Amino acid sequence: MVKLALHPHRRAHSNGRESGDRVGRPFFEISNLSVSYGGVKALRDLSLDVAEGDIVALLGPNGAGKTTTLKAIVGWSRASNGRIAFEGRDLTRLNTEDIVRLGVTMVPQGRQVFSRLTVAENLMLGGLARGKRAGATDMASEMLDMFTILKERRHELAGNLSGGEQQQLVIARALMSNPRLVIFDEPSLGLAPGLASRTFELIAQLRTRGLTIIIVEQNVGLALAISDRAYVLADGRLALSGDVASLRGSPELKQIFLGIESAAL
């Protein structure tokens, strides 16, 4: 069971969900971003913005540029052109550690736990990623209260957890850095359908902690079910964007994913 606490500094929409105000400067913004590998452009002139409190999906088939975009955001790849900004602060040339300290973190694909460390030790490593030892123990206690199955197994090796428990651990470990923007990289990858659905339900609940979320995902149906807006990439370019209501059932979206049977549109 997962219990999530409401962030005290958010205003609720009339539909009950949390979000920031869209007026003024975007909370997170990518402007004309291009990334090249060995002279080959993997991403071309991508622009997008994310409002505070929203869940935004970044979709596209294999090779579309999703992973390249993610790597550029967290500092793993360098932009050849363009700008990435978080709360007005330019992230484009910062290293990963500085980006995390500013409040941006990623939940990697593949449930990458430190298998020979305990659940509690995994959490503490996540806290140190923010560069501050002070408060890490209190944050770990909060995470264990939130993710109750992890509290029950906090002294067990992470490698002994089930797939679903490991997924909860990597999410809790990412939250240990006290982020404001969380990026999920293919959270459904390798999970059985039922477990993937429960993982996306958990991600949707995280906005009640005051988080803004970007989901990089191939399973279109799961991503659109919890997102406010989506950007769709194809061949390294932005092909479609809009709110979920306008994209769901879109002939253009279906065309982009034509031949991908797992894309439940």
Image (tube, rainbow, N blue to C red):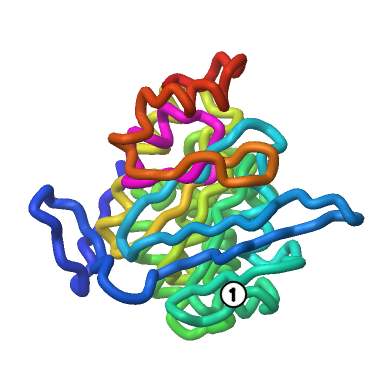
Residue 87 sits in which quadrant?
bottom left
Q: Is residue 3 left or right of 34 when viewed as pictured? A: left
| Residue at the outermost left position | 14
Above/below status of 86 relative to 230: below
At 65% from the left and 74% from the top, the residue drawn is 92
Front position in the image: 184 or 154: 184
- Check the picture and name the quadrant holding the N terminus: top left
Q: Quadrant of the C terminus?
A: top left
Quick check: 227 left or right of 150? Answer: left
Point 44% across, 44% down: residue:
241
Q: What's the residue at 35%, 29% (across, down)?
A: 248
The answer to which of 104 and 46 lies nearer the viewer is 46
Give the residue type that dot 1 points to: Ile
For residue 239, above or below residue 181 = above
Which quadrant of the view contains residue 97?
Answer: bottom right
Q: Is residue 162 visible?
A: no
Query: Residue 129 placed where, x, y %?
Result: 59, 72
The residue singled out by tag 1 in the image is 99
Residues drawn in magenta: 216-232
Residue 5: x, y in percent? Answer: 23, 60
Q: Position of residue 15 (x, y in %)?
A: 12, 48
Residue 253: tell me if it is visible.
yes
Residue 106 within the magenta-colored segment of the rendering? no
Considering depth in this image, is 200 or 164 the residue closer to the camera? Answer: 200
Q: Which x, y percent locates residue 253?
A: 48, 28
> Magenta stretch: residue 225 in it?
yes
Answer with left or right where residue 243 lies relative to residue 40: left
Circle 1 sits in a helix, a strand or a loop, which is it?
A: helix
